[in-house]
Image: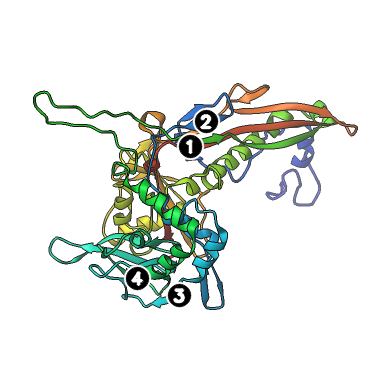
């Protein structure tokens, strides 16, 4: 009788037939293609409309805008003493483009550090507006007057935000809103009198401020664009205004970026071990997967053209409490027309679903490219693990409108490359060296452009910890 655990071996230990180990020497093994971890759904590459860029550069032409910048500032500290980095003051609309570093050093030294406890008023509605405030650390709420006297939240401010810089160039004005600390806040304050004193001592700063005042007096629409004079509702032979549409004189240009690698393969491998699978094709297939993953990472995180860094600061919001709530998602949706999808890390999506469950809300799902995905207000929420999770367990949620026809976000690429093996990816054979190793240059070219600022929004610093 054969042993059940060792076929072909009887109970007496003697083999009575050919065993499987020996039989495998004559058998053909059925094998899989090489498998690879780290391949994701890459939703961003799938949903972005891709524009062919034959010249290597894409220029975004816009209407002339008189609106000044609205950047965020960076700070340094020595122990508990916090100071704004002088060159960062150029992020203030008031000082954008000002080039005198010595004056900026003096101005940075005039800021006074104050600390506010949660619930304390940093600025109070109706009081004289005579101070520039820089929020170095913490979170605060900008509060307006509601219809029946109660406060209403206009905005949420956090690290690097500022307010009050416009007030110091106007006289006898008052705060139209209040700002209340939500967490302990470290704030740097510059009184108007200190700024005016510095203006009187610096001809360059005086000329810069006067130029800014003249710029802000020019007719502009609510978005800061040069106004187009129109009239409506008139009767008879009314004299019509004369107008033209002016353009930016220095529009932004996006140069295609590149992801590359040199794939090396020994000729002995490709000559002798090419059946049943082509060794070069399998090497290229896995290399292209890695390139595509890196391409999506760059489209999110690259400091030059990545979406996280190119969202307009007026389109960046902070959550009202901490985790991403339905209220926060509604707030970021209302900032643009025709939002087509959200993009978030899978853990951020899980945090949003926890907040929905806590409120007894159950988000719907929609079908996209044959796949059921979660949605909020009918807008798909797509997972993307390239969006970073910070050390403090916070992340970001992007929402965007796409396509040239909608003045949205677009992807840029170049196809028709020499020795192209799939659209936008080429593999050029380079040389075979003295060790019989053949090299192949694998390349792909890409970038992304935001055609108008409100096409892209970011909900920043959302907490995803349990």
Q: Earlier in the sequence, mark 1 or mark 4?
A: 4
Q: Which label was assigned to residue 58?
A: 2
- Judging depth in this view, the residue of 242 and 152 nearest the camera is 242
Mark 3 Cα-neighbour bin, 10 Å: few <14, some 14–19, many ≥20 = some
Q: State which quarter of the image contains the C terminus.
A: bottom left
Which residue is most to the left?
236
Mark 2: few, some, or many residues within 10 Å (few <14, many ≥20)? many
Residue occupying the far right of the picture: 434
Mark before the other along the chain sequence, 2 or 4? 2
User: Residue 113: which disc?
Assistant: 3
Q: Residues within 10 Å of mark 4 (few under 14, many from 20)?
A: many
**Which colouring convention does the figure follow?**
rainbow
Q: Nearer the viewer, mark 2 or mark 4?
A: 2
Answer above or below: position of 79 versus 5.
Answer: below
Label 1 with label 2: CB-CB less than 8 Å: yes
Residue nearest the observer in this picture, 136 or 282: 136
Question: Where does the image place residue 55, in percent across and percent down from the top left?
Answer: 58, 25
Q: Which mark is residue 182?
A: 4
Q: Classify residue 216 as left or right of residue 6.
A: left
In terms of sequence position, does the residue under pointer 4 or pointer 3 come before the other? 3
- The CA span between labels 2 and 4 is 43 Å
Give the residue pinned by disc 1.
449
Per the model, the C-alpha gap separating discs 1 and 2 is: 8 Å
């Amino acid at each position: 009788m054969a042993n059940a655990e060792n076929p072909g071996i009887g109970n007496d230990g003697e083999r009575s037939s050919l065993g499987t180990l020996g039989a495998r020497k004559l058998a053909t093994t059925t094998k899989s293609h090489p498998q690879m971890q780290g391949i994701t759904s890459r939703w961003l590459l799938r949903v972005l409309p891709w524009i062919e860029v034959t010249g290597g550069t894409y220029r975004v032409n816009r209407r002339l805008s008189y609106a000044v910048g609205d950047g965020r500032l960076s700070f340094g500290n020595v122990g508990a003493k916090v100071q704004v980095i002088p060159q960062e003051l150029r992020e203030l609309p008031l000082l954008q483009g000002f080039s005198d570093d010595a004056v900026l050093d003096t101005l940075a030294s005039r800021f006074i550090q104050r600390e506010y406890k949660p619930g304390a008023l940093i600025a109070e509605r109706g009081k004289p507006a005579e101070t520039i405030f820089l929020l170095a650390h913490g979170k605060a709420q900008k509060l307006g007057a509601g219809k029946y006297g109660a406060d209403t939240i206009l905005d949420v401010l956090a690290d690097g935000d500022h307010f009050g810089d416009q007030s110091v160039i106007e006289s006898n004005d008052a705060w139209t809103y209040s700002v209340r600390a939500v967490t302990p806040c470290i704030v740097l304050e510059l009184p108007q009198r200190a700024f005016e004193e510095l203006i009187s001592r610096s001809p360059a700063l005086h000329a810069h401020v006067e130029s800014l005042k003249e710029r802000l007096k020019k007719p502009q629409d609510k978005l800061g664009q040069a106004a187009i004079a129109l009239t409506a509702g008139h009767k008879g032979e009314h004299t019509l205004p004369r107008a033209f549409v002016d353009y930016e004189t220095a529009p932004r240009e996006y140069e295609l970026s590149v992801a590359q690698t040199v794939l090396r393969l020994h000729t002995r491998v490709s000559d002798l071990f090419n059946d049943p699978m082509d060794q070069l094709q399998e090497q290229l297939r896995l290399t292209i997967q890695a390139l595509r993953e890196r391409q999506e990472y760059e489209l999110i995180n690259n400091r030059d053209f990545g979406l996280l860094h190119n969202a307009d600061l007026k389109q960046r919001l902070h959550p009202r409490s901490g985790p991403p709530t339905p209220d926060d998602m509604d707030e970021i949706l209302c900032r643009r027309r025709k939002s087509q999808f959200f993009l978030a890390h899978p853990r951020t999506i899980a945090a949003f679903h926890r907040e929905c469950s806590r409120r007894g809300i159950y988000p719907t799902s929609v079908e996209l490219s044959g796949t059921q995905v979660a949605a909020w207000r009918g807008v798909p929420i797509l997972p993307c693990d390239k969006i970073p999770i910070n050390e403090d367990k916070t992340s970001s949620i992007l929402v965007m409108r796409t396509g040239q026809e909608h003045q949205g976000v677009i992807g840029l690429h170049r196809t028709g490359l020499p020795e192209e093996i799939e659209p936008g990816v080429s593999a050029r054979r380079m040389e075979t060296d003295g060790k019989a190793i053949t090299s192949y240059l694998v390349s792909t070219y890409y970038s992304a452009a935001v055609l108008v600022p409100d096409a892209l929004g970011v909900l920043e610093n959302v907490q995803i910890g349990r």
